[in-house]
Amino acid sequence: MKRYLPIVLALGVVGVIFASSSIRDELGIQYAPESLHAYFLGLGPLAPMIFVGIMTFRSLLLLPSLLVLTVGGLVFGAPMGTLLGGLGIAISGSMMFFIARGIGRDWVRRRLGERILGFEQRVEAAGPILIGLTTAHPMGPMSPFHWAAGVSSIRAHRFLIALGLAGLARAATCSYFGSSLVDIGSRDFYLSTTLLLTVVFIPLIHPTLRNKILSP
C-alpha cells in the first residue's frame, strides 16, 4: 500500500486542481474584489463556511490570499474576517505540511526539484521563526514554505503553533483593511491602510528579513 500512496495522492492533487478550476469558473469568481464581494454577499448563511473553503484552497483556485482576506474583512467585518481567514490559512498550511510529510522527503524532492530544496534548507535553519515571518507577512509566499516544512525535520507541533499564530496575524491585518473599505476616507480607512503598508514594507527594509520573506 505504501508503494502506491504517493501515486494516489498525486492523482488526488491533480483531480483537486481540475475540480477547483472548474468550480471557480462555474461560480463565476473572477480575480477582482468586486467579484468576490458580490459572490459572498449572495451566499447567505453559508458564506462563512464557503469563505473558509475558498481560503483553504486559494492556491488551487489561483486566488491571492491578500485579495481573499481583504474581501473577508469587507464582507464579515474585521473580527470575523480574522477568525475565518486565520482558520483557512491554518487548514491549508496543515494540509500541505502533512501531505508532504506523509508522501516522503525523497518523493517530494524528485517531483518539485531543486527549488523545494532551497526552501527546505531555509526552514531547517530558521525553523518556526521563518514559518511565522512568511505566514504573517501579507505578501509572504506561504505555500512553498508550508510544503518545505513538511519535508524538513521541523516538529509538527512547532509548525502548527507558528502557523496558527502567524495566520491570525496575516488575516487580522488584511481583514482590518478590508473592513475599512466600506467607508473610504474615514479614520479607520487611513489607520488600516497605514498598518497594512507598515506591515508590508517595514520588514523589507532589513535585508536579512527581506531575504527570508521574499527570496525564493
Image: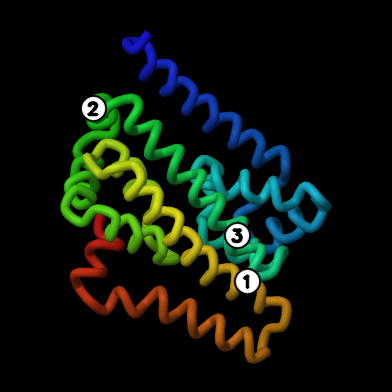
Q: Who is closer to the viewer here, 214 or 169?
A: 169
What scheme was used to colour the molecule?
rainbow
Whole-angstrom CA distance, mark 3 to mark 1, is 14 Å
Q: Secondary structure at mark 3?
A: helix
- Amino acid type of the residue that numbered disc 3 sits on in the rendered structure: Leu
- Seen at 40% across and 58% down, the residue is 135
The quarter holding residue 191 reads bottom right
Q: Residue 136: where, in percent of width, then height?
A: 41, 64
Image quadrant containing the N terminus: top left
- Amino acid type of the residue that numbered disc 2 sits on in the rendered structure: Arg
Which is nearer the N-term, disc 2 or disc 1? 2
- Direction from residue 17 to residue 143 in the image, left or right: left
Check disc 2 and report the residue beneath it: 110
Whole-angstrom CA distance, mark 2 to mark 1, is 40 Å
Position above or below: 123 against 19: below
Whole-angstrom CA distance, mark 3 to mark 2, is 36 Å
Q: Residue 95: where, in percent of width, then height?
A: 45, 38
Q: Residue 215: where, in percent of width, then height?
A: 25, 59
Q: Who is closer to the viewer here, 69 or 149?
A: 149
Mark number, residue 83: 3
Farthest residue in the front direction? 157
Q: Residue 83: where, in percent of width, then height?
A: 60, 60
Residues at discs 2 and 1 in contact (Cβ within 8 Å): no
Q: Secondary structure at mark 1?
A: helix
- Seen at 63% across and 60% down, the residue is 32
- Seen at 24% across and 53% down, the residue is 127
Viewer-nearest of labels 3 and 2?
A: 3
- Direction from residue 52 to residue 116 in the image, left or right: left
Check disc 1 and report the residue beneath it: 178
Which is nearer the N-term, disc 3 or disc 2? 3
Which is nearer the N-term, disc 3 or disc 1? 3
